[in-house]
Image (cartoon, rainbow, N blue to C red):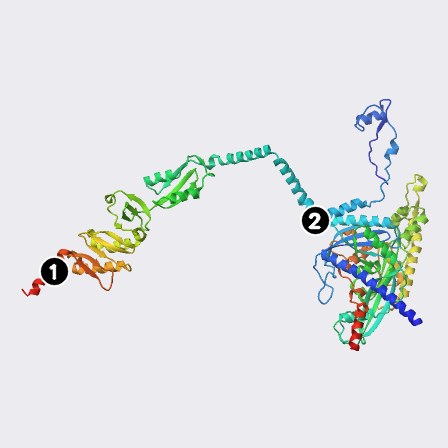
């Protein structure tokens, strides 16, 4: 049994308008009212056309299907063809100079609009841990005209510039929420003053330059060192100064001799010549002798400790003369 | 004079065997390739339908080391990923008679199966039922050289088989060693490594008309496919429809197809006989068509819906509308009682079964320890066939369906698909054939060189 389907019969010829049942059928929307005519040749259209009895694919379609099922071809269709398409479209679009510039401008525009949002703007620089002078110096070496976008700031580079300043021991730079460029500085603390031919300068405990000094009176609290290459042995000098604390006001300073050893310079022209090796112990020996014998209170010009096995004392000229006089007197037997 | 003739004949047979070796080995190699690639198509070219499965081999489920069959009956190594069936055209009695038509039908089935599998298939293993299969029993006996059975010795004993003159225009389809015996021990499945003096083998050889194979190969080549194996459908439907015990103890599988009814006898898990009756379900349909005066399509429909072979009293009252669309009201409103229909069908079915009986008797089926008969194939779905068959063939008859394999669609589980399912099992676990063993060296032309060397050594 073939299934009955409603088939729209073609309207071939309709000389007069339908009446009666046909009119009712048309009014119900059975057939689209197209022109005037009457349905003819209906029955032959209702018959199904003879079906193709052979379902076999043609040789071409069979080969085509097999070709499309080949793994390489399938991969190519899935990946290669879209890739080529996108590539071709992209290069076609970019072939024109005008479009390329427009694209670049558009990209730059979008970039700028994102970078210049108020969330990303840095409005001021806050410096913590630095004195007024240093803060001014830092503001001088980091010339920024705020507000500036945080995308344009190279924080590491700024930090290196600040760390490059002499009085700065270390620094951290970060962008704080709220648009603040926060600079935390640890200053170098001067430990000694160093007198050179060029003038006075302050050094910290590692021997690094902190600042120049106009006169010694500005920082009388700092001990004084002198001599070439003294800044390279500041820690040793500091140890000596600590050991020489019992000398009190008598000590004037330390002098580096020949870039290898220290002299302790006292007032009244006295000097203690220390050896290259273990100078602190040598100084302590002198101080111990001084404690017992009041060595430095006598007419001694230099105490030479350079040879540990044979400390030598150079007397002052007056003391030497006096000593000769005393000896000759007693030598005469008078 | 007579001796010279005999020698000539032997040489001709040997030449033939060498060709056979080469073509079968090429096919075996192709099958290895296909399995390595993982996808192979299985094609059953029948007289009424052509069915195609696409198998994917995933490398799991090999047989265990002792070659025992596991819980899934050794069919876990593959999965059916595509299946299609189409009406066969141009095939009669299981042989291709119209190449173009058959090629188109194969193409239809393959395209649909490929589409379902979503993968391209390049290798196909095919089976067909017709082409006058003829079974030969071969045997040979050799003295072992080293008293140990090695693979080379098995090759030697297989080659010692006296090949009968099976005639020009025939080709060997299967040649399977079914039994080895060593000295006086028989029934060895795998004698390798055993000790003994004499090794003998029984072999079953099946030949078919070579034109049928050639036509099939040509059709498949025209579809841009490589033929990776050919099998007889009597054999493969036995593989899938018989359960393990039946194969072991002896049974016959009767595959009632459209154009042919093929018979195969199994014993000790080997096919020992195969034959084919050139009558099938199409002949029953033809009888109905002639008897009722209806076209073949209508006759087929009546047979499928109302057919049977046992008439009861109720069948006299049950009227079947014959139908028709000639436009003649009287002609289109004819009806026939079911008893009449059974009266048309039964003689033909009986004739087929009688013919099968004759073949079974000729093969000596009565002497098997168990005489189970399994009916399968599309024709076995006729109602009441098992009762009729047990009256003609013997008491132990059952209807067989193919094994369930992974991924087989529900529509392909009927008895009509036992040969295609069996062929996929066969593809996964092929039986050792003659040509799987190495030819002894003295069969090659290299022999002349060896002889020269021997002569040289003897004389100098």
Q: Are marks 1 and 2 in contact (CB under 8 Å)?
A: no
Q: Identify the disc placed on residue A72.
A: 2
Give the x, y percent position of residue A242.
26, 54
Q: Residue furthest left?
A: A334
Whole-number angstrom distance, CA of label 1 to CA of label 2? 115 Å
Query: Where A50 falls versus A327 (above or below)?
Result: above
Q: Give percent across and percent down for residue B237.
A: 82, 59
Residue A164's disc is none
Residue B273 shows in this picture:
no
Report the residue at 91% width, 70% height from top. B4
Q: Classify mark 2: helix, strand or loop.
A: helix
Above or below B33: residue B114: above
**Left-right relation of B110 to B212:** left
Quadrant in which the N terminus of chain A appears: top right
* Label 2, residues with CA under 10 Å away: few <14, some 14-19, many ≥20: few
Q: Quadrant of the C terminus of chain A?
A: bottom left
Element marked by disc 1: helix
Which mark is nearer the camera, 1 or 2?
A: 1
Chain ID for label 2?
A
Say which mark, if any, is on residue A323: 1
Residue B301 image point, x, y percent: 87, 48
Between residue A199 and residue A28, name the one nearer to us.
A199
Name which quarter of the figure residue A2 lies in.
Answer: top right
Dot 1: chain letter? A
**A130 or A320, nearer to the observer:** A320
**Furthest-top residue in view?**
A16
Other residues around mark 1 within 10 Å, as few (<14) / some (14–19) / many (≥20): few
> Quadrant of the rendered structure where residue A18 is?
top right
The structure residue drawn at horizontal position 37% and vertical position 38%, both measured from the top left corner, is: A140
Q: Is residue B453 visible?
A: yes
User: Residue A142, how many percent across, how many down?
Assistant: 40, 39
């Amino acid at each position: 049994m073939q299934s009955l389907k409603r088939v729209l019969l073609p309207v071939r010829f309709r000389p007069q308008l339908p009446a009666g049942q046909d009119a009712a059928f048309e009014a119900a929307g059975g057939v689209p009212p197209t022109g005037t005519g009457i349905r003819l040749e209906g029955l032959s259209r209702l018959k199904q056309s003879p079906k193709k009895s052979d379902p076999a694919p043609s040789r071409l379609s069979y080969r085509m299907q097999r070709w499309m099922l080949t793994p390489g071809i399938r991969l190519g269709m899935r990946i290669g063809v879209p890739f080529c398409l996108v590539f071709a479209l992209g290069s076609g679009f970019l072939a024109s100079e005008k479009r390329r510039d427009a694209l670049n401008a558009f990209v730059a525009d979008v970039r700028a609009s994102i970078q210049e949002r108020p969330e990303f703007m840095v409005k001021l620089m806050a410096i913590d841990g630095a004195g007024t002078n240093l803060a001014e110096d830092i503001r001088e070496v980091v010339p920024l005209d705020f507000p500036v976008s945080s995308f344009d700031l190279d924080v590491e580079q700024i930090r290196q510039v600040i760390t490059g300043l002499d009085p700065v021991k270390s620094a951290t730079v970060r962008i704080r929420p709220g648009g603040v460029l926060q600079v935390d500085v640890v200053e170098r603390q001067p430990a000694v003053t160093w007198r050179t031919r060029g003038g006075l300068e302050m050094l910290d405990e590692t021997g690094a330059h902190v600042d120049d000094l106009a006169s010694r009176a500005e920082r009388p609290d700092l001990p004084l060192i002198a001599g070439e290459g003294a800044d390279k042995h500041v820690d040793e000098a500091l140890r000596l100064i600590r050991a020489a604390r019992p000398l009190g006001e008598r000590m004037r300073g330390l002098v580096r001799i020949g870039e290898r050893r220290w002299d302790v310079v006292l007032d009244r022209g006295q000097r203690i010549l220390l050896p290259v090796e273990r100078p602190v112990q040598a100084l302590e020996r002198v101080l111990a002798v001084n404690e017992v014998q009041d060595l430095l209170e006598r007419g001694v010009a230099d105490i030479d400790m350079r040879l540990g096995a044979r400390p030598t004392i150079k007397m002052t000229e007056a003391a030497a003369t006096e000593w000769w006089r005393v000896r000759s007197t007693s030598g005469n037997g008078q | 004079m007579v001796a010279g003739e005999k020698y000539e004949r032997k040489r001709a047979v040997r030449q033939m065997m060498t060709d056979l070796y080469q073509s079968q080995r090429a096919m075996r190699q192709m099958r290895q390739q296909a399995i390595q690639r993982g996808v192979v198509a299985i094609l059953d070219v029948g007289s009424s339908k052509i069915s195609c499965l696409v198998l994917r081999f995933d490398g799991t489920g090999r047989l265990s080391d002792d070659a025992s069959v596991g819980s899934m009956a050794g069919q876990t190594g593959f999965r059916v990923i595509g299946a299609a069936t189409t009406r066969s055209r141009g095939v009669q009695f299981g042989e291709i008679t119209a190449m173009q038509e058959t090629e188109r039908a194969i193409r239809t089935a393959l395209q649909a199966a490929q589409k379902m599998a979503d993968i391209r298939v390049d290798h196909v293993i095919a089976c067909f039922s017709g082409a006058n299969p003829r079974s030969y029993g071969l045997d040979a006996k050799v003295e072992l050289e080293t008293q140990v059975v090695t693979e080379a010795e098995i090759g030697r004993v297989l080659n010692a088989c006296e090949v009968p003159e099976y005639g020009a225009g025939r080709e060997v389809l299967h040649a399977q060693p079914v039994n080895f015996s060593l000295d006086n021990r028989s029934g060895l499945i795998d004698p390798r490594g055993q000790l003994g003096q004499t090794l003998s083998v029984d072999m079953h050889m099946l030949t078919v008309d070579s034109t049928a194979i050639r036509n099939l190969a040509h059709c498949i080549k025209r579809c841009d496919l490589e033929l990776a194996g050919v099998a007889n459908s009597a054999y493969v439907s036995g593989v899938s429809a018989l359960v393990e015990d039946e194969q072991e103890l002896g049974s016959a599988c009767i595959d009632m197809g459209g154009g042919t009814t093929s018979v195969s006898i199994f014993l000790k898990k080997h096919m020992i006989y195969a034959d084919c009756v050139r009558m099938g379900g199409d002949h029953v349909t033809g009888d109905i068509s002639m008897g009722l005066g209806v076209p073949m399509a209508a006759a087929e429909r009546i047979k499928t819906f109302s057919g049977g072979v046992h008439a009861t009293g109720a069948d006299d009252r049950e009227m079947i509308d014959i139908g028709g669309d000639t436009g003649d009201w009287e002609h289109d409103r004819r009806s026939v009682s079911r008893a009449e229909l059974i009266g048309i069908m039964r003689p033909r079915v009986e004739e087929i079964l009688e013919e099968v009986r004759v073949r079974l008797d000729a093969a000596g089926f009565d002497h098997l320890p168990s005489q189970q008969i399994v009916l399968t194939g599309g024709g076995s779905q006729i109602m009441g066939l098992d009762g009729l068959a047990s009256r003609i063939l013997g008491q132990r008859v059952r209807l067989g369906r193919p094994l369930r394999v992974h991924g087989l669609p529900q529509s392909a589980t009927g008895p009509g698909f036992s040969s295609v399912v069996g062929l996929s099992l066969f593809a996964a676990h092929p039986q050792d054939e003659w040509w799987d063993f190495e030819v002894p060296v003295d069969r090659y032309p290299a022999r002349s060189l060896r002889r020269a060397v021997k002569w040289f050594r003897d004389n100098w």
